[in-house]
């Protein structure tokens, strides 16, 4: 019983393998015949050549347009870099200014890419010899008394004036002295 079944499987396998082999051979033969027909058909080859030539010309035109676009963009990048340099130098020249993200106080110092509140190094007050008070901010407790340079480096509320400063000294009844630690964009 099992021998007949085994023989039957062998016959079926041989039949299927033969059918598959014949089918693939027919496919290869058909593909070869189609290629031979194309080779023999000169007009078809010339037409395909012309179509490929047209596609090649279109691709070359597209490449030249894209190259020109790249050159234009590179020129724009160079212009923007120059404008950025000009703006950075102008920013340094247009100090002081206010930047609310740094606090309400005037930004008065720009050094090594960092902005600072407080006393400038260029100020020549007698109490700022050798720039020992550079970037200092003075917070006064008594709001009744009028103060000179209130917007520059003096304030009544340090939290509004600068948001990155350290307490470095001062009499707590009259004034406190803070030093700005710098701000970056």
Image: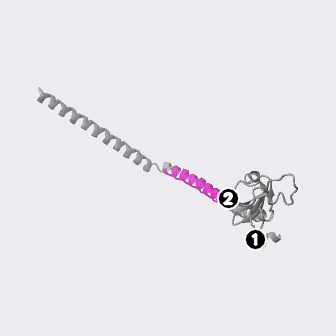
Quadrant of the frame with the N terminus: top left
Residue 11's x, y, as percent? 19, 33
Q: What secondary structure is found at the residue carrying circle 2?
A: helix
Which residue is found at the position 76% from the left and 51% from the top? 160
Mark 2 highlights which residue?
73
Q: CA separation, marks 2 and 1?
A: 46 Å
Magenta residues, as a range? 45-72
Residue 124 appears in the rendering: no
For the residue labelled by badge 1, is the local secondary structure a helix, a strand or a loop? helix
Q: Farthest residue in the bottom direction? A: 130
Q: Main secondary structure of the magenta part?
A: helix
Q: Residue at x 52, y 53 (%)?
A: 49
59 displayed left or right of 3: right
- The 10 Å Cα crowd at callout 1, few under 14, some 14 to 19, many 20 or more, is some
Q: Nearer the viewer, residue 18 or 34?
A: 18
Q: Earlier in the sequence, mark 2 or mark 1?
A: 2
Q: Which residue is depicted at the point 51% across and 50% down?
A: 48
Q: Position of residue 118 (x, y in %)?
A: 77, 61
Q: Residue at x 37, y 42 (%)?
A: 30
**Is residue 69 a member of the stretch shown in magenta?**
yes
Examine the rendering and report whether any part of residue 20 can be seen: yes
Residue at the disc numbered 1: 131
Q: Is residue 62 left or right of residue 151?
A: left
State the residue in front, 23 or 96: 96
Question: Hey, which quadrant is residue 176 in on the image?
Answer: bottom right
User: On the rendered image, what quadrant is the C terminus found in?
Assistant: bottom right
Q: Quadrant of residue 23?
A: top left
- State yes or no: discs 2 and 1 in contact (Cβ < 8 Å): no
- Closer to the camera in the image, 92 or 39: 92
- Outermost residue, right side: 146
Residue 150: assigned label = none
């Amino acid at each position: 019983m099992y021998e007949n079944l085994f023989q039957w499987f062998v016959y079926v396998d041989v039949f299927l393998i033969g059918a598959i082999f014949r089918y693939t051979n027919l496919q290869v033969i058909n593909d070869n015949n189609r290629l031979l027909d194309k080779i023999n058909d000169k007009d078809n080859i010339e037409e395909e050549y012309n179509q490929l030539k047209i596609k090649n010309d279109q691709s070359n035109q597209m490449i030249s347009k894209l190259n020109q676009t790249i050159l234009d963009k590179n020129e724009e990048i160079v212009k923007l870099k120059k404008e950025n340099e000009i703006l950075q130098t102008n920013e340094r020249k247009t100090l002081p200014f206010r930047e609310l993200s740094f606090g309400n106080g005037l930004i008065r110092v720009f050094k090594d890419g960092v902005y600072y509140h407080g006393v400038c190094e260029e100020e020549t007050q007698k109490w700022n010899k050798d720039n020992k008070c550079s970037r200092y901010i003075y917070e006064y407790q008594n709001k009744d008394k009028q103060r000179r340079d209130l917007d520059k480096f003096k304030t009544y509320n340090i939290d509004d004036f600068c948001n990155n400063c350290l307490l470095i000294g001062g009499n707590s009844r009259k004034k406190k002295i803070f030093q700005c630690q710098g701000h970056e964009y």
